[in-house]
């Protein structure tokens, strides 16, 4: 049986919060990866190994299979090369039809990731880019999240930050839009869960329309139980909930905050990982029309 995790410690299974059985499992996990030739010193630090162990509830066999599958995928996908050299010159054009971006941090220091699915125009989008390039951009952003954003936010708050705070905006989304993008969403979910596990800290679905239960019935099977438990589904009255977790000055004004980055929040990449953008003088927000 895998070692159990105490329910009383919200940081259980993380560095500094390991039970004796968990520490033994971590040590054995690392040694077996070394013995079998799968250990990558520059990437497999203890914090990373623990993400895979937590994702499989400290089951050593399943955790090892998961990380070996990830290593095989990285080679097939060309992830190391992509992380260093991927370029996405169509970023500004894509942003008009499918905004996906990191922007500042929540009250716990997590990088905030925002996706505006309701603004999606898939027909126009796929004239600008392709599904394959969107997935490669996604992986590039995951790598940047792990290697740049998390270390920068951790340095600012003074403790390890390992997860993101995600906002998925469904304002004006239609069933037709979702059907057109469901293949991309399915593949993106698979990449996130299987190859970058335990990176989700908070997840807010806002402006969920009345027919969202239909969309959710498609999405939910793609997600594991732990992920589903972290998701807050909100309607149009979401601002108070977001502001409980996110400082108003870090939340874009069109989502109920006060931030108006000079070049637009979706293109600013503002956060501790980008001091130039974070220090730029904000544009005075235009008051919302009542």
Image (cartoon, rainbow, N blue to C red):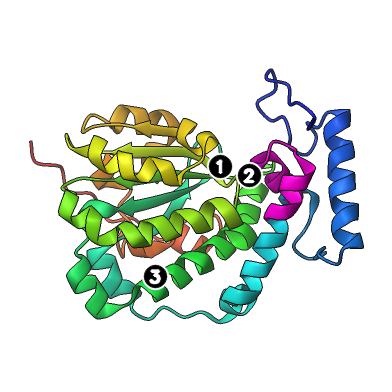
What kind of element bears circle 3? helix
Residue 266 in the image, given as x and y percentages of width and height: 33, 60
Q: What residue is drawn where x is 28% and y is 46%?
A: 169
In this rendering, which labeled residue sits more in front, label 1 or label 3?
A: 3
Q: Which residues are magenta?
A: 49-66
**Residue at the limit of the structure toward the top, as seen here:** 8
Q: Earlier in the sequence, mark 2 or mark 3?
A: 3
Looking at the rendering, in which quadrant would you find the C terminus? top left
Mark 2 or 3: the one toward you: 3
Q: Position of residue 167 (x, y in %)?
A: 37, 44
Q: Which mark is residue 109?
A: 1
Q: Is residue 50 magenta?
A: yes
Q: Is residue 276 magenta?
A: no
Q: Which residue is mark 3?
A: 134
Mark 2 Cα-neighbour bin, 10 Å: few <14, some 14–19, many ≥20: many
Label 2 SS: loop
Q: Residues within 10 Å of mark 3 (few under 14, many from 20)?
A: some
Tell me the SS state at disc 1.
Answer: loop
Main SS of residues in magenta: helix
Residue at the disc numbered 2: 161
Comparing 222 with 99, the one in front is 222
Above/below status of 251 relative to 277? above
The answer to whether any part of residue 97 appears in the image is yes
State which quadrant residue 102 falls in.
bottom left
First in sequence: mark 1 or mark 3?
Answer: 1
Decide if residue 279 is in sight here. no
Quarter-wise, where is residue 268 in the image?
bottom left
Label 2 to label 3: alpha-carbon separation: 26 Å
Residue 14 x/y as whole percent: 73, 37
Horizontal side of 142 relative to 285 (left or right) equals right
């Amino acid at each position: 049986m895998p070692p159990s995790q105490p329910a009383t410690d919200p940081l259980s299974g993380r560095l500094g919060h390991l039970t004796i059985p968990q520490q033994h499992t971590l040590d054995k996990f690392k040694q077996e990866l070394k013995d079998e030739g799968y250990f990558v010193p520059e990437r497999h630090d203890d914090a990373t190994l623990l993400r895979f162990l937590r994702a499989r509830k400290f089951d050593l066999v399943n955790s090892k299979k998961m990380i070996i599958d990830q290593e095989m995928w990285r080679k097939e996908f060309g992830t190391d090369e992509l992380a260093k050299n991927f370029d996405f010159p169509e970023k500004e054009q894509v942003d008009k039809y499918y905004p996906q971006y990191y922007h500042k941090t929540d009250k716990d220091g997590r990088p905030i990731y925002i996706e505006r699915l309701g603004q999606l125009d898939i027909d126009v989008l796929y004239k600008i880019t392709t599904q394959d390039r969107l997935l490669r951009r996604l992986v590039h952003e995951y790598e940047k999240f792990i290697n740049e954003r998390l270390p920068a936010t951790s340095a600012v708050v003074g403790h390890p930050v390992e997860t993101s705070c995600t906002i998925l905006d469904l304002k004006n989304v239609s069933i037709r839009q979702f059907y057109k993008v469901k293949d991309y969403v399915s593949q993106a979910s698979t990449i996130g869960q299987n190859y970058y596990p335990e990176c989700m800290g908070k997840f807010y679905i806002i402006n969920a329309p009345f027919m969202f239960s239909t969309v959710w019935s498609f999405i939910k099977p793609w997600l594991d139980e732990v992920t589903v438990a972290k998701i807050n589904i909100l309607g149009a009255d979401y601002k108070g909930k977001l502001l409980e977790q996110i400082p108003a000055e870090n939340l874009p004004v069109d989502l109920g905050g006060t931030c108006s980055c000079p070049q637009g929040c979706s293109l600013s990449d503002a956060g501790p990982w980008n001091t130039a953008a974070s220090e730029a003088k904000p544009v005075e927000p235009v008051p919302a029309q009542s």
